[in-house]
Image (cartoon, rainbow, N blue to C red):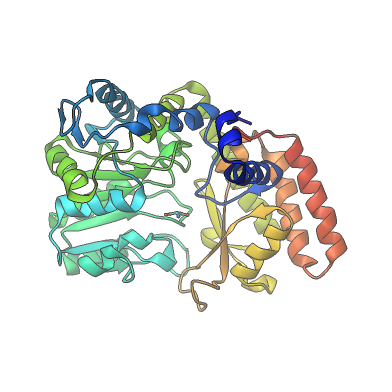
């Protein structure tokens, strides 16, 4: 564990929470598809004196004095983001995914403009036009869905809706979709109707940057990503775009949406981007996908209903209906044996979002610990046994102990 000697002395109560959470992260299995373990170097960068600085504006054009050194950290992060994703332009200031998406809409659209995005219960994100989110309140979203037979986005259907609705922007991206996105086809459809293309690659940025999935950055007008999922950095986000939109994007982030950037987080983003440029990150990304495929295959062998029949990326959504348990109950049952997953809606879910039919599982975090196919097979077996014997306390205790034994063999950065 990192030392935290000053925190320990100053505030034992807070230190106790940090210690307990570090223990939990090390002792349990993290299968939440959007979570990962940032490296010790990323964690250290977040704890630096860069947190003390205000630096509204951009390198060379700040509204506060004393930013000549801070400019360096922002420039390093920008250069690394551009190199990693082959981007013409990068803004590394967005505080997280939703604010980044807000800035994208703000840069390209006016309130009331028509936009197309993937529906939430079909794998989209709240900020892709859900009515309870600012995106659905401010903009006129029309939503596309996955095909009910294949569980995949049907590009002919996307084209049909786009031609009929003529949105000003098409959003491609997701929170719970396990297949490759046909970026080129999205671009062709958008070109046909003169729409902007916006890719939200929050989930797969690490896999894309490592060349393991197709990269929309050179193709699309604008791209957002969080930095803490498969990219394995600090909580935060980045927007990339064509050079011609740079000024609009910058102005939308600051002063449009945000105040001062969080410079300690920018430093941590720079560290994570540097790590992702290294050769061993490519191997990590490849293993994330191999592990996810292994996991999906094991679930399928045990007669689980994996939406779309498998995965091309790091995640899968499993409909638990044929196993006689809801997504919420499965999440809580697995939590009791030391496995974290997130409940998830399935396409056209008959159940409400708080108690949906499915669970979403992902492999980024366990792969960071060094787990491979052998461990993944054990994990699926434990999940299956826990679900099959859900009322058997002795069996649950035994599985929990076995999970703990496995966790002891695979360390966690920072824990
Ligand atoms: N909360 C993230 C996820 O779990 O996918 C998206 O915002």
Residue at the bottom extreme, as displayed = 350
- From the viewer's perspective, tell me whether residue 23 is left or right of residue 349: right
Question: Is there any visible trace of residue 218 in the rendered image?
Answer: yes
Residue at point 41%, 31% (across, down): 268
In the image, residue 61 sits, relative to residue 166, either above or below, namely: above
In the image, residue 135 sits, relative to residue 282, either above or below, namely: below
Quadrant that contains the C terminus: top right
- From the viewer's perspective, tell me whether residue 45 is left or right of residue 224: right
Residue at the front extreme, as displayed = 10
Q: Position of residue 234 (x, y in %)?
A: 44, 38
In the image, residue 17 sits, relative to residue 321, either above or below, namely: above
Which is more toward the observer, 406 or 199?
406
Question: Is there any visible trace of residue 191 in the rendered image?
Answer: no
| Image quarter where ligand 1 lies | bottom left
Q: Position of residue 91 (x, y in %)?
A: 25, 36
Which is more toward the observer, 232 or 255?
255
Residue at point 30%, 67% (across, down): 143
Which is more toward the observer, 247 or 83?
247
**Quarter where residue 329 is shown:** bottom right
Which is more toward the observer, 370 or 50?
50
Residue at point 50%, 46% (across, down): 313
- How many callouts does the rendering have? 0
Residue at point 24%, 67% (across, down): 141
- From the viewer's perspective, tell me whether residue 238 is left or right of residue 39: left
Q: Position of residue 97 (x, y in %)?
A: 35, 49
Quadrant that contains the N terminus: top right
Q: Position of residue 107 (x, y in %)?
A: 16, 50
């Amino acid at each position: 564990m990192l030392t935290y000697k000053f925190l320990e002395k100053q505030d034992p109560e807070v230190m106790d929470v940090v210690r307990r959470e570090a223990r939990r992260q090390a002792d349990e299995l993290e299968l939440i598809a959007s979570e990962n373990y940032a490296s010790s170097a990323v964690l250290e960068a977040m704890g630096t004196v860069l947190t003390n600085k205000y630096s509204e504006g951009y390198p060379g054009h700040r509204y506060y004095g004393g930013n000549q050194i801070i400019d360096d950290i922002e420039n390093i992060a920008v250069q690394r983001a551009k190199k990693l994703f082959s981007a013409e332009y990068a803004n590394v200031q967005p505080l997280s995914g939703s604010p980044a998406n807000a800035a994208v809409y703000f840069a390209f659209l006016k309130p009331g403009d028509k936009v197309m995005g993937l529906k939430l219960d079909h794998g989209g994100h709240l900020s892709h036009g859900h009515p309870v989110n600012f995106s659905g309140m401010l903009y006129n979203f029309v939503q596309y869905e996955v095909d009910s037979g294949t569980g995949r986005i049907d590009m002919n259907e996307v084209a049909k809706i786009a031609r009929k609705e003529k949105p000003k922007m098409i959003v491609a991206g997701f929170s719970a979709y396990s297949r490759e996105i046909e970026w080129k086809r999205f671009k062709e459809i958008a070109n046909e109707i003169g729409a902007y293309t916006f890719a939200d690659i929050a989930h797969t940025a690490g896999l894309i940057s490592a060349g393991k999935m197709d990269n929309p950055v050179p193709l699309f007008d604008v791209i957002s990503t969080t930095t803490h999922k498969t990219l394995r950095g600090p909580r935060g986000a980045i927007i990339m775009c064509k050079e011609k939109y740079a000024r609009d994007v910058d102005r939308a982030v600051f002063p449009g949406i945000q105040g001062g950037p969080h410079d300690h987080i920018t430093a941590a983003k720079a560290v994570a981007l540097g790590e992702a440029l290294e050769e061993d990150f490519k191997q990590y990304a490849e293993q994330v996908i191999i592990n996810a495929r292994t996991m999906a295959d094991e679930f399928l062998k045990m007669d689980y209903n994996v939406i779309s029949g498998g995965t091309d990326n790091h995640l899968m959504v499993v409909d638990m209906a044929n196993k006689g348990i809801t997504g919420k109950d499965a999440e809580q049952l697995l939590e009791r044996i030391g496995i974290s997953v997130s409940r998830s809606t399935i396409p056209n879910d008959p159940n409400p979002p708080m108690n949906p039919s499915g669970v979403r599982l992902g492999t980024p975090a366990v792969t960071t610990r060094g787990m491979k196919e052998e461990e993944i097979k054990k994990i699926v077996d434990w999940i299956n046994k826990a679900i099959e014997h859900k009322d058997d306390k002795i069996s649950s205790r035994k599985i929990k102990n076995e999970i703990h034994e496995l966790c002891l063999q695979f360390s966690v950065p920072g824990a």
